[in-house]
Image (cartoon, rainbow, N blue to C red):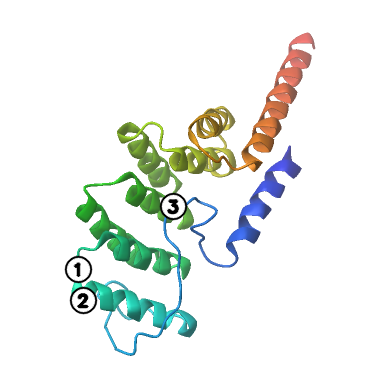
Amino acid sequence: MQIHWRSRLAIIALSCGVGACANIDMGSAQISADDSGAAFTSVYRGDAPIPEHLAGAEQRLLARLAANADDPDTLVRLGVLYRHVENFEAARKVFAEAADATGDSAKVLNEIAITYRASGDFNQARDTYLKILSLVPDFHDAHFNLGILYDLYLGEAELAHKHYSAYLDAAPNADARVEKWLIDLRRRFDKASDASVVNVGE
């Protein structure tokens, strides 16, 4: 059981690299570097540094926000960038503005939940995913992420099974790994059941 757990966590860690990762968590935005040629000050990250190789991307996004401060797509991209460099406070500020601009859209709330998970605030992440599903019950990204959260971080195997299954039912192009994760969970259930029978017999 422990081997399966660590193997799955290793897959996520390797996919994400050093920082937080939008892709493995089914985030909606991607990051690309670009030199905008103009200097804009971030009101979100304060004096916190930004890696040189991403400074151009930040400047490009800030330039877009200078022209349209309420553009949710740009806000989400900027939030993903800050989450990528583990500036979670700045990421939450940006995502909060995106949520206001979109009326708490499921995609933006998903990014907020991912950020909570990445920063270690697992209960807030869980509550945010559940909020998403109360608004959009078949939002498969939330089921996927909530399954991982319950499975690897909160130790709630039955709830993980529930949300992995819901993800497979809802996702048009489901991640093939989830089927394997469900098989792993069922094996764990069977082992726990066998152990319970042995204990009763003793």
Q: Is residue 186 left or right of residue 124?
A: right
> Dot 3: within a 10 Å radius of its alpha carbon, few (fewer than 14), some, or many (20 or more) residues?
many
Residue placed under numbered mark 1 in the picture: 69
**Mark closest to the chain's N terminus, 3 or 2:** 2
The tag on residue 11 is none
Quadrant showing the N terminus: top right
Spot the residue most to the top: 201
Residue 49 shows in this picture:
no
Front: mark 1 or 3: 1
Residue placed under numbered mark 3 in the picture: 114
Residue placed under numbered mark 2 in the picture: 66
> Dot 2: within a 10 Å radius of its alpha carbon, few (fewer than 14), some, or many (20 or more) residues?
few
**Against 28, is 195 above or below?**
above
Q: Is residue 192 left or right of residue 83?
A: right
Spatial separation of the CA atoms under disc 3 and disc 2 = 26 Å
Q: Is residue 9 left or right of residue 201?
A: left
SS state under label 2: helix
Q: Which amino acid does the dot numbered 2 rest on?
A: Ala
Q: In x, y percent, where is residue 104? A: 25, 47
CB contact under 8 Å: marks 2 and 1: yes
Spatial separation of the CA atoms under disc 2 and disc 1 = 6 Å
Front: mark 3 or 2: 2
Spot the residue most to the front: 172
Q: Residue at x 33, y 67 (%)?
A: 90
**Quarter occupied by residue 17:** bottom right
**Against 144, is 65 above or below?**
below
